[in-house]
Image (cartoon, helix red, strand yellow):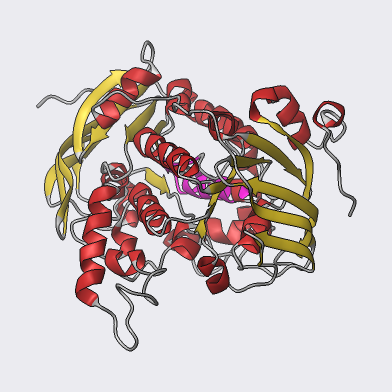
Amino acid sequence: MKHDPQLAVEMRHIVKRFPGVVANDRVTFSARKGEVHALLGENGAGKSTLMNILSGLYHPDEGDIYVDGRPVVFHSPRDAIRAGIGMVHQHFMLVPSQSVAENVVLGLREVGLTLNPRRIEAEVQRLGEQYGLPVDPRAKVWQLSVGEQQRVEIVKMLYRGARILILDEPTAVLTPQEAEQLFRTLRAMTAEGKTVIFISHKLDEVLSIADRITVLRGGRTVATVEAAGMTKVELARLMVGREVLFHVEKPPARPRGARLVMRDVRALDDKGIPALRGVSLTVRAGEIVAIAGVAGNGQRELAEVVCGLRPVVAGEIEVDGRPLANASPLEAIRAGVAYIPEDRTGTGTAPNLSVAENLALKGYRVPPIGGRFFLNVATMYAQARELVARFDIATPSVHVPARKLSGGNLQKLILAREVARDPRLIVAAYPTRGLDVGATESVRQLLIRERDAGAAVLLISEDLDEIFMLADRIAVMYEGRIVGEMPAEEADLETVGLLMAGEQGVAHEETGTTTHGA
């Protein structure tokens, strides 16, 4: 087959199998020099597996890879780097205690026996300035924000001579401003003839940054299309094989009595600094109250004090009149509190336990799974299989460790476990973050169904479109305080956005909101 000189990389008929699943099934993919090529698909479609093969982390069971028309075989990421291919993974691979410059050269044989720190720092700074990736070469990684850490990962690959850069879900942890800066950087790189492969599930971003798009579904290549002229609806149909609703139908709420009541709650963050500064909030049965705010304004601490994961230093928390301030997580569970945390692997699941064991984590103390002395293992597995089918969790079996699931299926596992016990209050922190359009649609419909069944839902999200779509009431947090609260039908993007930015007087007269002092 004749090589197209415009192609930087080509993968032909790639097959990769794992126990019980074929992750890539004869996938064909190619990217041109000087383009941003988006790799799109549902969670678990095989995107990351394919790029892990291209970056040398996995070895394909079948198929061929060509770089600049030459066949290559990679046995490690070092081989891929030598061929000019570098990958920035979704979970960064940096050493927190080392400096930026030290991380950039870590593992490089070419550095030699003696380091010249000033030369390395100067080169790191030059690369950062050239590509609009400002980083302090001497800063320790633990001192950097998530967005800054991502810049370090990209600079690290550029320092090693990467001409083909793979970014796995690069905007999942970025603010909108950081994402815009990243896109400018990617355009500067492709203008120099470099190739960027952009793994994502965010359709708006893909359409704004990509030149071409390859869609995977069920481990197979569905289509490769020019981004120009495509629409979100067409891309979503290619991804999931059906029509996707971008607006969830939501009947009017029928709120009843107060379910969650918080009065003047104060709490500290992990560094001992005040994170909640007098939060008062009520969530009623049969309604969704959304907390809007830029990350880091107390949202995580708010969720954790309600669920018994963080102590309060003052104030009261009640669920159905039951005091829960400084209660244990077990007491919160017994009060009917369900928690969908933002950290799926660190908080939401036990990654090394099986799917069945994770689904039983909240029910193993009581019948029918829990007995006086022993677990009813047969019932545990039967219930797990029923929940896997009901919530459409893609897993080869309920015996598979939870860490083997894709992000979307891990989120479905958490939802299944939390909702199966008919919760009275659901605390959902960023429940659709990192999910594809199909999984996002399912999660949003589930929260509305639980609301209509009588649950109170406290939704924490940075996605204003999601907040306006789901919320019955919106409360805005800024620096640990509720600075504005209004019915969703009376809210608008400008007002909420200004409140999120700290313009505290903007909506107080029309909404009757009070701002609590420190």
Q: With respect to residue 402, does 15 lie above or below? A: above
Counting from the top left corner in percent of width and height, residue 301 is at: 67, 58
> What residue sits 87% from the left and 48% below the top?
516
Along the horizontal axis of the image, is 258 left or right of 105?
A: right
Asked where in the image residue 104 lies, by quadrant, the reply is: bottom right
Q: Quadrant of residue 227?
A: top left
Residue 163 colored in magenta in the image: yes
Whole-percent x and y of residue 76? 29, 58
Residue 465 picture quarter: top right
Say above or below: 281 vs 204.
Answer: below
Badge count: 0
For this view, does 241 lie left or right of residue 63? right
- In this view of the protein, can residue 65 be seen by the observer? yes
Identity of the residue drawn at 46% across and 61% down: 348
Q: Position of residue 412 (x, y in %)?
A: 36, 50
Q: Nearer the viewer, residue 328 or 19?
A: 328
Stretch of the chain drawn in magenta: 148-170
Viewer-nearest residue: 422 or 356: 422
Residue drawn at x 55%, y 42% is 286
Examine the rendered structure and indicate whether residue 312 appears above or below residue 133: below
Whole-percent x and y of residue 449?
Answer: 43, 40
- Specify the farthest residue to the right: 517
Q: Is residue 400 magenta?
A: no
User: Can residue 31 be spotted in the picture?
Assistant: no
